[in-house]
């Protein structure tokens, strides 16, 4: 199957700093990428959907100024958590979908800990 | 709107016994259905999918699932469980034709499978 690489796999940052998470599709063109957040022992919560070259569409309740998403190319999307706070600590997962495909492929996830 | 229900938070089974993890869905049109497995601090690993065709879908690691349109179900099964199957399992649905939901996958709440030796 197709490969989606997410980096870093874990990160610890100080409160007030920003953290960038990258999501790359390695062997296909990802026209759409999704960013999820997962709290311990809970399901995946969709944060936003991004299409290459256009602004991301955020789900209700997700602060777009706090979670900046960029999808500048067909193989790369980034999520930047700005001015991170301890409550932003979570597991973040990206997935990528190519046009016309039924199946999205998932990255390995990033464990963010804000101290 | 599309939705997925996984009615069991946890399923316990003895190694060697068959296992079933339940999933029901709701979509306006025809569904794409998926099962994923997640190990601690890892992303989702794809197990199997139903797109079209045979209702019985075979996937990775000996898992299979049966699409039942009348019952709107897509239960995950395995004839003989292994201790290494212990993990968190997610069912997901995408409506093929629903423009408002775009390409979004909707996940169930997950079912933790515990296989005892």
Image (spheres, coloured by chain):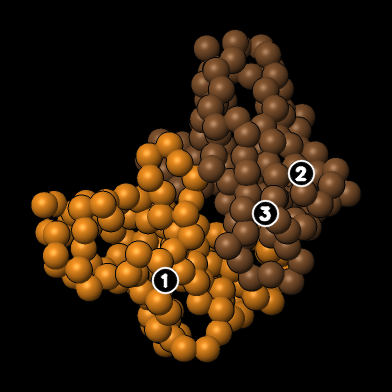
Q: Which-is-in-front pick, marks 3 and 1?
A: 1
Regarding residue B53, the answer to whether it shows in the image is yes
Task: Check disc 1 and report the residue beneath it.
Answer: B59
B55 relative to A14, above or below: below
Residue sitting at x 40%, y 76%: B58
Q: Residue at x 55, y 59 (%)?
A: B106
Return the residue at label 2. A76
Q: Residues within 10 Å of mark 1 (few under 14, many from 20)?
A: some
Q: Is residue B90 left or right of residue B94?
A: left
Tell me how far mark 2 sits from mark 1, CA to CA.
29 Å
Which residue is identified by label 3? Answer: A96
Disc 3 element = strand
Q: Please, is residue A75 above or below residue A67 in the view? A: below
Q: Residue at x 56, y 22 (%)?
A: A11
Is B25 placed above or below A60 here?
Answer: below
Q: Is label 2 in a helix, a strand or a loop?
A: strand
Dot placed on the residue nearer the N-terminal end, 2 or 3: 2
Q: Chain of mark 3?
A: A
Q: Is residue A113 left or right of residue B13?
A: right
């Amino acid at each position: 199957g197709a490969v989606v690489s997410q980096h870093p796999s874990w990160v610890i940052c100080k409160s007030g700093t920003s953290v960038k998470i990258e999501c790359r599709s390695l062997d296909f063109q990802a026209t759409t990428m999704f960013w999820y957040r997962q709290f311990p022992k809970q399901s995946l919560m969709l944060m936003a959907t991004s299409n290459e070259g256009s602004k991301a569409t955020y789900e209700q309740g997700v602060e777009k100024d706090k979670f900046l998403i960029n999808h500048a190319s067909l193989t790369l999307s980034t999520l930047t958590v700005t001015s991170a706070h301890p409550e932003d600590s979570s597991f973040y997962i990206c997935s990528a979908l190519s046009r016309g495909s039924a199946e999205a492929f998932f990255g390995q996830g990033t464990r963010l800990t804000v101290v | 709107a599309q939705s997925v229900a996984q009615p069991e938070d946890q399923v316990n089974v003895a190694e060697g016994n068959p296992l079933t993890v339940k999933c029901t869905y709701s979509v306006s049109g025809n569904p794409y259905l998926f099962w994923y497995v997640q190990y601690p601090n890892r992303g989702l690993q794809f197990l199997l999918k139903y797109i079209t065709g045979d209702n019985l879908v075979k996937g990775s690691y000996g898992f299979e699932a049966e699409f039942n349109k009348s019952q709107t179900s897509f239960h995950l099964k395995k004839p003989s469980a292994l201790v290494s199957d212990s993990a968190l399992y997610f069912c997901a649905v995408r409506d093929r034709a629903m423009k408002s939901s775009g390409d979004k996958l909707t996940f169930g709440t997950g079912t933790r499978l515990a296989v005892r030796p």
